[in-house]
Image (tube, coloured by chain):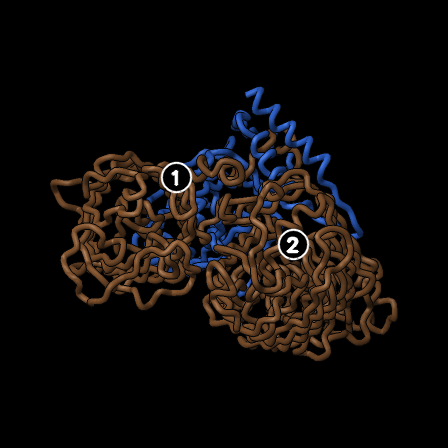
Chain colours: A blue, B brown
Amino acid sequence: MMRRRTVFALIGAAFALAACSGGSGQKQDSTLTTLFTSAKAVYDSWGQPAPQPVVVTRALLDQTPGQVMQAIPDRTGLQDFLRLIAQRRDDGPGVVEVWQSSDNIQFILRDGVLVGTKGLGPDMRSAQAGATLAGFDGQGGGGARLITLARGNDSAQRVEFACDMTQMGRDTIQIVDQRVSTYRMQETCAYGGTTFTNEYWVETSSGRMRKSRQWVSPGFGYIAFERLKN
Amino acid sequence: MAKGGAVQQVIKPTRIVTGEVRKIRVIGTVFAVVCATQASAQDADIFDVPDRPTLNFYGSPGLVDMPTAESLPDGTFAIGVSHFGGTTRTTLTFQATPRLSASFRYVGIQDWNANGFDTYRDRSFDLHYQVLKERRTLPAVTVGLQDFAGTGIYAGEYVVATKTFEGGARLPGRVKVTAGLGWGRLASSGAIGTPFGGTRPAFDPAGTGGSPSVDQWFRGPAAPFGGVEWQINDRWGVKAEYSSDAYDAETGNGVLVRKSRLNFGTEYQLSNRIRLGAYYLYGSEFGVNVQVQLNPNAPLTPLSVRPTGPIEPRPDRAVSPEAWSTDWSESAQAPLTLRDQLTPVLAASGLKLEALQVSANRAELRFRNTRYRATSVAVGRAARAMAQVMPASVETFRLVTMHNGLAQSAVTIRRSDLEALEFDSQAADALLAVTGIGEAAPMLENAVYSDTLYPDYAWTIAPYLEPNYFDPDEPVRFEGGIKFELNYSPAPGWELGGRLKHRLVDTFSDSTRTSNSVLPRVRTDSILYARGSDTVLDTLYVSRQWKPGNDIYARVTAGYLERMFGGVSGEVLWKPVGSRLALGAEANYVQQRDFSGLGFQDYSVATGHASAYYEFGRGYLGQVDVGRYLAGDLGATVTLTREFKNGWRVGGFFTLTDVSSADFGEGSFDKGINLTVPLDWFLGTPGKRTLSTTIRPIQRDGGARLDVPGRLYEQVRQGHRNAVTDNWDRVWE
């Protein structure tokens, strides 16, 4: 361990001495320098312990101005808190909300249904939510959802998923110190061999989505949202 | 969560994009190759990850030493390094189209001790074409030409069929059965007849090679070969084959003893991209094979761009008409104020404002993109920056991308479309449908210009490493050292550029291979240049480029244009914004530089080309250059390139001139491979830089082109309609 660190330090020193630049614009580092810096950052972050999850309390929420959404991606299981940065009505169904993570990833929701992400890499570029929102009427239902997914080669793939919405009945969930009475809904979508299943918990009193677990993309998987504070 | 800091301050949130996956990948690529790639197997079948065939000792889909009829997934690069019995083959295979693949191989055979070689070293090219794809009942069928352009010892042809069996109740995994018929080397053992007649000449080590040996293909005796591969599970596989290769040349020279026609092996899939194999060949030798498969479509680190804030819609006109007033446009100060407001917003996205022209309801922005390889990302960000800054009455945005003083194209977007479509269920397609991409005038009238952009300069001191391939004594030679680069631009289109290099280490200067060329030694004196001096003024030039018309681009460059030549160069290019075709002409008068210092040698030449460029679509690009080359020879170069949407480029080229094969020397004519890999493919952060290399089997003096900095076509094309719309999916990033 120690030896690897020393080697890195020496290479780093060599590069620091060898590579510098300047100019009226922001001239970028040389290619070799960039590769090295990137690898160094990676190396440094190895072996750091995963942060402990935070138990959110009412007091903590009260200190926080604005609305708060908790987000936990399946693939890391780690928790982040999102900030509402925009709220819009447009020609589409529902109200659009843009939520931003601490590392500047944006999640775009229409009445709580995920219709886009920005900054992830394997993003959901855009999506229809009409069929899903129509299924929240308590009757179930479903229909086609066109979802545009980013691909690794910088293009996007438009996929028409066939979705079914199932009413799972009433469910009381715990959000921080509140017990919230909800309708629970399950949406199963399929395209060829790919399927995903989203779950939604919609507050009975307000019709607002309080909790969900939604699929983003093949490369990112699922993410769980919980609306902690309105 | 800048505003709602309380939660964050208390709890230090983790990030949505955990670096974990990315980390493993970057380190793997840059330093070890071997530990790359755990992840990305999660790609669900929605992205249609096709079956990945395994490679043989020749680095193409196959059994142990024999080929199969399989194709690699479209676009895949396969690198195979195999070793047995003193023979090491390093092969790069590229699946150029779904059916056609090409391989380039470098081989070293130890203890050859004949034909003037201690260690026999040679380059060879293969082509494989899958005639039939596998069907439910029919096998895949492939025709292959091995070492088709040489007099090398590997020359052979084959027709082979492979059928996959899967899902049997008794046997887990997947079984592939292969049978084929080989000619040439692949018929040196167990021949059954001569179906197409003819004879084949023996290997001639003195020949110049390099030309397709059409008269030999499928001639002489033919022999059957075949084998079975059993892919037991995702990790392990075993192979057994019957080889039709007698290894005549190797056994004749005592390199290896061949006791059997049967070969066996077992392979282990180490990661998504890497497979290792161990084998027992020809009844006498153990062998190993390292197989790496890279697909440009699967980046090592997915590219992610930090998003901008959503567009703030303008207030309702009926509710607040005063916000829509056009009075502001009467003020002479307004354009200056808007310019100053817009500049930092653009800068946050890596864009530089060059000029701005505003009126009450239209605005044209001319800007430079310093960050995004995909022009569409820059256009989308510029549009949103305009929506953030411009007064409500400005409805039409014209966005003109500039590259070194050249206006590439004008993208016209209505602001109300931007506002309406940002969260549309098909946001990118819907915006493209209402966007115009047209020609841009050379200059913008009545505009305010950036007062901070010029003089523009940049300099770098950095280490460098330059490889050079296939010296007969050494497969890869390289030099490394420190370089100093300067670019100074006093005004739009003008540039003073230079590069000074100081060599610290190299493996060139001990080479004794000086030129034996009978042509003017315009390229083969590289060893003398390498010996010349450690500190070298690589380039130092002044250039000016401009647009004489909307579709016409021009450039003049003078100075030390490259390491070996200096002089003057002029170029004109015709490329309408929406055209697939471009035509260009370049004329140069250059003199050969001294091996060291700033002087010149006696040799001077007028060289130049007329060029036609064509975008075939789906990323295939073609180029033909006809003209006079550095050695004074007349001829043409044909280049075919496949460009992936994420910036990978791989191309092949060949040049035929009036120089005879004998005068050209080894290889008969000039040919090679160009490879460009964008750096952001590794790093996952946006950037325009690339790593490029040109690999030639051998560098001779015939068909050599001047290496002028800043040729026009690529500068212009990247901002034209096809390039912009190809990546339009990313416009909202």
Residue B211 seen by the camera: yes
- Which dot marks residue A91? none
- Which residue is rendered at x = 53% and y = 36% of the image? B31
Q: Amino acid at mark 1?
A: Gln
Query: Foreground residue, B153 or A182?
Result: B153
Residue at the disc numbered 1: B110
Query: Foreground residue, B153 or B573?
Result: B153
Q: Image quadrant of residue B439?
A: bottom right
Residue A100 seen by the camera: no
Query: Foreground residue, B335 or B26?
Result: B26
Which chain's residue wears label 1? B
Discs 1/2, front: 1
At label 1, counting other C-alpha atoms closer than 10 Å, the crowd grade (few under 14, some 14-19, many 20 or more) is: some
Label 1 – label 2 distance at C-alpha: 48 Å
Horizontally, residue B627 falls left or right of residue B208, namely right
- Which residue is rendered at x = 67% and y = 51% of the image? B529
Q: Amino acid at mark 2?
A: Arg
Indicate the position of residue A221 as horizontal and vertical percent values.
42, 44
Indicate whether B363 appears above or below A180.
below
Indicate the position of residue A62 as horizontal and vertical percent values.
62, 33
Earlier residue among tags 1 and 2: 1
At label 2, counting other C-alpha atoms closer than 10 Å, the crowd grade (few under 14, some 14-19, many 20 or more) is: some
Q: Image quadrant of residue B625?
A: bottom right
Quadrant of the drawing holding the C terminus of chain B: bottom right
Indicate the position of residue B499 as horizontal and vertical percent values.
73, 52
Query: Foreground residue, B533 or A134?
Result: B533
Residue at the disc numbered 2: B371
Q: Secondary structure at mark 2?
A: loop
